[in-house]
Image: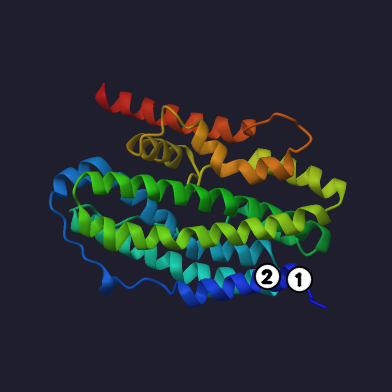
Amino acid sequence: MTIQPTADHRLREHVDKLAAEHPPLSLDDVDFTVRDPQALDARFGHVLDYMARVELEVDRNVLELTTMLPDPPDVDRYFYADVWQPQEIQHGLILDRLQVELGRPPAVADTDSISTKLKIMGALAHLGSFQDVVRMLYYLTGMSTERSAVLAYNLLHDGVVEMGEDAVATTVIAPIKRQEPGHYAFYQLSARGLWPTLAPWQKWLVRRLRALSYGPVGSNNPEQAADFGEVMAALGIADRFDDFVHQITRVETELLWAQRAGLKVPDYVVNAFREAVELARARSGARAA
């Protein structure tokens, strides 16, 4: 008789595979040759800065996770501490080195602050039933973040190739974007495994907290939201982000909002992206005035 592997076993196998097949990238393997630094800076410099900051802030993200999840499953800790963090830090260091090569200042990353809101969630998470709510929010955020990264790096890669910056495309963007889908897969597998086990009140609370707390990756205040709006504009999605948003929330919509037949994208996601675009345009207008 064939014994089917458990969900936890499949997750651990997935993380083991990520660790074995995708070790952290090395700066020594990167060719930072740029044909036209001014043109690359003008078109994608602020995109590189935003992405570098987000990647470098995984140190803070891990602190947040240890605060919010006092007793996570072993596979979660294995993933975010031993695999995800080392990979993402190297992404940030490489992107930051590239923007410095373009003559830009290094990214300013917040690597150690933890909000009061997260500390309160962490205190409540000592109750096992509430920790499962927090875990679900973590998986949902991870899915949205990593799917956004996959799509954004694909668009950035296409743009860099179009500019003829082959070294950057081949040794910077391509290796980074190859590592992101595995992260997304971890969160998706985890979310699909946890959601059916939650009680009705836990599912209600997840929906409520998700709607109240959602924000695009790396967007923690209005200034950063405007930065994100500028990234959207540079990648060509500011005026047509519906499909982008649909792709990053497909599983979230399927799990959380299955009872709302025909819902393509949760309103809170659309509103967050629209606000980022509007803030970017308002800031651009104020600069021009």
Q: Which mark is residue 165?
A: none
Helix, strand or loop for disc 1: loop
Helix, strand or loop for disc 2: helix
Camera-side residue of 11 and 285: 11
Amino acid at pointer 1: Thr
Q: Which residue is located at x 82 percent, y 49 percent?
A: 202
Q: Which residue is located at x 64 percent, y 34 percent?
A: 266
Q: Which residue is located at x 76 percent, y 31 percent?
A: 260
The mark total stands at 2
Q: Residues within 10 Å of mark 2 (few under 14, many from 20)?
A: some
Q: Which residue is located at x 33 percent, y 73 percent?
A: 26
Residue 22 as seen in the image, left or right of residue 236: right
Amino acid at pointer 2: Arg
Residue 219 as seen in the image, left or right of residue 33: right
Q: Which mark is residue 6?
A: 1
**193 w.r.t. 30: above or below:** above
In percent of width and height, residue 161 lies at 25, 49
| Residue on which disc 2 sits | 10
Residue 51 as seen in the image, left or right of residue 18: left
Q: Are marks 1 and 2 in contact (CB under 8 Å)?
A: yes
